Amino acid sequence: MAEDDDRIHSKAARLRRIEHRLYNTPGGLRVIDLANDCGVVRRTIYRDLMALHEMGVPVWEERGRFGIDRATYLSTVRLNLNEAIALYFAARLLTHHSDEHNPHIVSALDKLASGLPDQTISSHIAQAADVVRSRPVRSNYIRNLEALTRAWADRRLVLLRYRAPNRESTEREVAPYFVEVSRSTPGAYVIGFDRLRGAIRTFKIERIERADLLDEHYTIPDDFDPYAFLSNAWGVMDDAEVDIHLRFSAEAAPRVRESVWHHSQHLVERDDGGCDLMMTIGGIREVMPWVLSWGADIEVVAPPDLRAEVASHSARMADRYR
């Protein structure tokens, strides 16, 4: 792609730029804006818009503005072999994460499988789609997920009817800032500004009873960084920071050493072959199931409330199996 000042001489590069700009501007752009951005005259932009339409890009025009219908837009991605393998890993993780039939996951995996030239990889991704396809459909979840996706993409507020565990339903106007999936259990979450609480809150999508798009638009604050927001979380919940000290037996230590469990972790070897794992994470709620999964091969040294919770669980388990 050759460039001279702001002028883009390559038509292919200019079309890609216009397509990118239109897709990422939900309200559309004027021809004069695109012409100034590309350094060409308006007549050229009109021809480019017609070329995009003829290529199958769903371009719309309304009141002098042009945009792209993101609901029907299909992107094109070219991958080498190693990139295809990386997507295969992602597809396998996706099948583990989704515990129900999500038609959008199935459709995405089907398209990915049909678009890859390597038959071995494409066949396994197709099988991953079949795994998700065989699961039960929960139409209300899909409807809510679609509403949240559109709200996040178009920066529109959404009205949620949300039921937390063992609580009454509440209605909340939420501005979605980020969508995240849990790394430990099947589940997806939306993080956004909750007008009811006047603060950023995290909502599990599976607990949303209804999600309705509102006409009001919002902007995500410049200082909101979702990766910084979640940096200390064990999963998706960012509670108050707490220092965790876990002691693993010699039998469990090799498995502990194999992985990086949290970016803050510090591993200390012990003379008996075991190891101690220290981390600073956001609260103890999400880490509790992981700690319990190690059974008798782990001891919680700190904090005291996590140690007490594990001791209580252990006592109840002993009573149940006695």
Image (spheres, grey):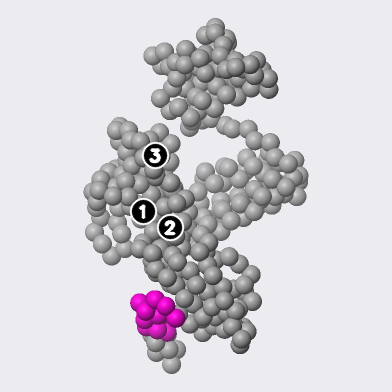
The local crowd at label 3, few if under 14, some if 14 to 19, many if 20 or more residues have their Cα within 10 Å, is: few
For mark 3, what is the residue?
222
Q: Which residue appears farthest toward the bottom when viewing the image?
A: 322
What SS does tag 3 mark? loop
Instruction: Specify which label sits upstream in the sequence, 3 or 2.
Output: 3
Residue at the image point whose x is 44% and y is 81% from the top: 301
- Whichever of labels 1 and 2 marks the residue nearer the N terminus, that label is 1
User: Image quadrant of residue 54?
Assistant: top right
Q: Mark 2 points at which residue?
A: 236
Disc 1 to disc 2: CB gap under 8 Å: yes
Q: How far apart are marks 1 and 2 (CA)?
A: 8 Å
Query: Considering depth in this image, is 226 or 210 the residue closer to the camera?
Result: 226
Q: Mark 1 points at which residue?
A: 202
Q: What stretch is highlighted in magenta?
A: 301-314
Residue 322 in sight from this viewpoint: yes
Seen in the picture, residue 42 relative to 247 is either above or below; the reply is: above
Judged by its main secondary structure, the magenta piece is helix
> Which residue shows up at 54% across the image and 8% down it?
41
Q: Point out residue 245 in the picture as x, y percentages from the top left corner.
A: 47, 76
Where's the N terminus, which quadrant?
top right
In magenta stretch: residue 238: no
Which sits in the foreground, 166 or 175? 175
Q: Which residue is drawn at 64% across and 70% down?
A: 258
Which amino acid lies under the numbered mark 2 shown in the image of this protein?
Val
| SS at mark 1 in the image | strand
> Residues under labels 1 and 3: Cα distance?
19 Å
Question: In the image, what residue type sits under mark 3?
Answer: Asp
Image coordinates of residue 125 in percent, x first then y, are 66, 49
